Amino acid sequence: MAASDKEHRVVIVGAGFAGFNAARELSRLMGNTTEIVVINPTDYFLYLPLMPQVTGGLVEPAHIRVSLPSRLRKSRFVLGTVTHVDPSPTAKTVSWTGPEGAAGQVRYDRLILTAGSVDKLLPIPGLADYAHGFRSIPEATYLRDHIIRQLELAAVAADPAERAARCTFVVVGAGYTGTEVAAHGQRLTTRLARSLPGLAGQEIRWMLLDLAPRVLAELDPRLSKTAERVLRRRGVEVLTGESVAKAGDGYVELTTGDKFVTRSLIWCVGVRADPLVDGLDLATNRGRLVVDEFMAVPGAPSIYACGDCAAVPDLTRPGQVCGMTAQHAERQGKLVARNVAASLGRGSVRPYKHRDLGFLVDLGGLAGAANPLNVPLSGPAANAVTRAYHLYSMSGNRMRVMTDWTLNGITSPDSTSLGAESVPLDVEKPRA
């Protein structure tokens, strides 16, 4: 990469919640004296919490993305995937490859690793071949098309077994993502079934599985029960203490030995740090980079890390690390930028210490569960707080998303497919 006439160069790997906010804050603090290079495999920042609503047809896919080149005008944006980091004092380089085979390398004075996470794949036979992931816009739009396609094909299928398989949807993982996917997916199939006479009298099954003893185990038990009650009232079968033991062509087998026919296995179990972390030869904690309370990597001068790929100490819970949530990643990104700026002579370093402000779950319609500032809410109040928080947290397209919600609140949401192609469960491909 060509040399810059600025005093320093900071390279940011990844532009998720942590990287995007780090780049914006660093641009504000050091944009005139420091070259900021952002490397990311997509040219947009994705607001992940609204992906279930994309699948459910409530929000347009383009409306939860914002352009990185237009939002990070004081940064140099590189479209590529980081493949190697050489932290040696004589090198201090980051290597990357582009989407069409191009490759490049850039030196850094400071490096911020915010590579994020990928789906966590468990050693379950058939999982990689038959499960659908849920970590990207292509996966969310594909899942929407897949759900619609299954019902349309079921409506004209003559074989009762085929109809049953196409009308059965199995979601594994009853955390935030899995619960919302099941909630919005069930509402999508309910709407669509009304327009398909061939499905008259056909049972459409949604199953939500988790080894945990209850859905949304991270939430207050009262809110967990609220979410489960909403799901069960809509007909979702909530199976706790169970998971998938085997997946095959047209069926899943549970840990209990029960077998169900299905063409739809949706994997929302959890995430692990991006595989880039594995090749850095740096200390890790359960797959995440070890960092101190200032988000500096011990033993690697000039390298910082935060977000899902880093085990940032949680000073509010001694001995534990911060969860892999957008809430933490966003705040860590802003603070790591200030700490990097301090290392370059502007400001002073501060440890990351921030209590969770609560949890929010949108269950579709007017249903929701939330505990903002530890105040338990459910129903329309929780839904309103959840949507208000999303609008506040988004970096753009607020009016577009609000318009989507308004239009889909007074009219029936569109249930046509988007023409997305099949997207396999991707757990190993590095995502910068």
Image (spheres, rainbow, N blue to C red):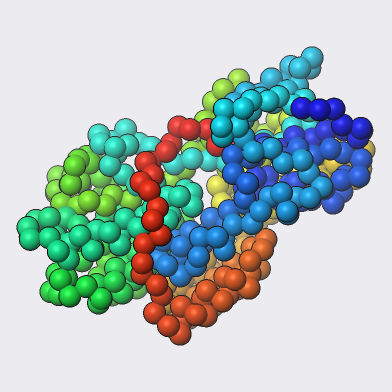
Image coordinates for residue 259, horizontal then vertical, percent: 14, 48
Image coordinates for residue 80, horizontal then vertical, percent: 62, 35
Residue 346 lies left or right of residue 372; in this view the side is right
| Residue 377 visible in rendering | no
In depth, the one of 264 and 296 nearer the eye is 264
In depth, the one of 101 and 32 nearer the eye is 101
Q: Name the quadrant containing residue 2.
A: top right
Residue at 38 percent across and 41 percent down: it is 425
In depth, the one of 76 and 355 nearer the eye is 76
Give the total number of marks visible in the rendering: 0
In the rendered view, tell whether residue 182 sits above or below residue 338: below
- Residue at the extreme top of the image, as rendered: 90
Image coordinates for residue 155, horizontal then vertical, percent: 17, 66
Residue 158 lies left or right of residue 33; in this view the side is left
Q: Name the quadrant containing residue 179.
A: bottom left
Residue at 17 percent across and 61 percent down: it is 154
Q: Quadrant of the N terminus?
A: top right
In the rendered view, tell whether residue 235 sits above or below residue 102: below
| Residue 10 visible in rendering | yes
Q: Quadrant of the C terminus?
A: top right
Image coordinates for residue 341, horizontal then vertical, percent: 85, 41
- Residue at the extreme left of the image, as rendered: 159
Residue at 55 percent across and 60 percent down: it is 62
Residue 339 lies left or right of residue 346; in this view the side is left
